[in-house]
Amino acid sequence: MSQLILATRNKGKLKEIQALLSGLPYEIHSVLDYPNIPEVVEDGETLEVNALKKAREVFLASNIPTIADDSGLEVYSLNMMPGVISARYAGENVTYAENNQKLLKELENVPAKKRQARFRCVIALVTSTEEILFEGFCKGKIIEELRGSNGFGYDPLFIPDGFTATFAELSLEIKNIISHRALAMNQLKSYLSDLK
Ligand code: IMP
């Protein structure tokens, strides 16, 4: 069985991705299994740069085909911010609640029809012969108050198109069908299954 490394130290993500790629003949490891691989600094200016940087560095250190992802929220009327800085929109080491308050403040007085946004996920696959990017989007809008307690990050403020509930009100089962991450993962999955 071939091996793949997932360049994340986040156990939740590892579980999610292992489940998603479960039907394929790959053994999926995380960088946690390789303590000598240094932590990668996510200082790129785009999601693409960060995903590629993480995948390249882990591949160079391990010589095992590597998958890395980066994602963020892009709000059209804020010039696609917070985007690549979604995790630290309100500053370094802030909570999800602080990022959500900052977003609400930035969108104060912005009318409903100008609150469109999308989540975007980029996945990089780096092997000895190729570097490939996969992308997934989930479009929707930012509401004016927090609703729901599932999920994480900006979920309580985001209603995906075609729904009336926020990501934080929807079940994880539904989110995992329509989310940016799921759509990007599905592309990776079909690419990997075509290889076999
Ligand atoms: P990551 O690259 O998946 O770690 O995501 C970076 C940041 O983007 C997170 O800290 C969240 O603020 C935001 N984000 C990414 N995906 C989601 C999501 O599915 N729901 C809510 N926020 C998200």
Image (cartoon, rainbow, N blue to C red):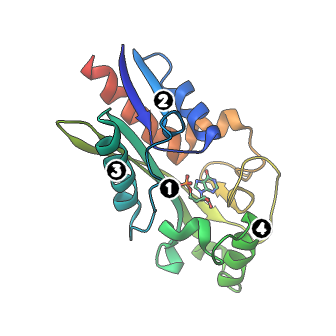
> x%, y% of residue 187?
38, 35
The residue where tag 3 is placed is: 57
* Real-space Cα separation, disc 4 to disc 3, in angstroms: 32 Å
Residue 46 vs 14, above or below: the answer is: below
Identify the residue under disc 4.
97
Amino acid type at circle 2 is His
Q: Which mark is residue 29?
A: 2
Q: Position of residue 41 (x, y in %)?
A: 45, 62
Callout 4: helix, strand or loop? helix
Q: Which residue is the extreme one toward the left?
A: 129
**At label 4, which amino acid type do we have?**
Ala
Secondary structure of the residue carrying numbered label 2: strand
Above-or-below relation of 158 to 132: below
Q: Is mark 1 within 8 Å of ligand 1?
A: yes
| Earlier residue among tags 1 and 4 | 1
Q: Position of residue 161 (x, y in %)?
A: 59, 53
Mark 1 lies on residue: 71
Under mark 3, the amino acid is Glu
4 and 3 marks in contact (CB < 8 Å): no
Query: Residue 189's spot in the image, x, y percent?
Result: 39, 28
CB under 8 Å between discs 3 and 2? no
Q: Is the residue at mark 2 in contact range of ligand 1, meaning its CB lies under 8 Å from it?
A: no
Residue 120 shows in this picture: no
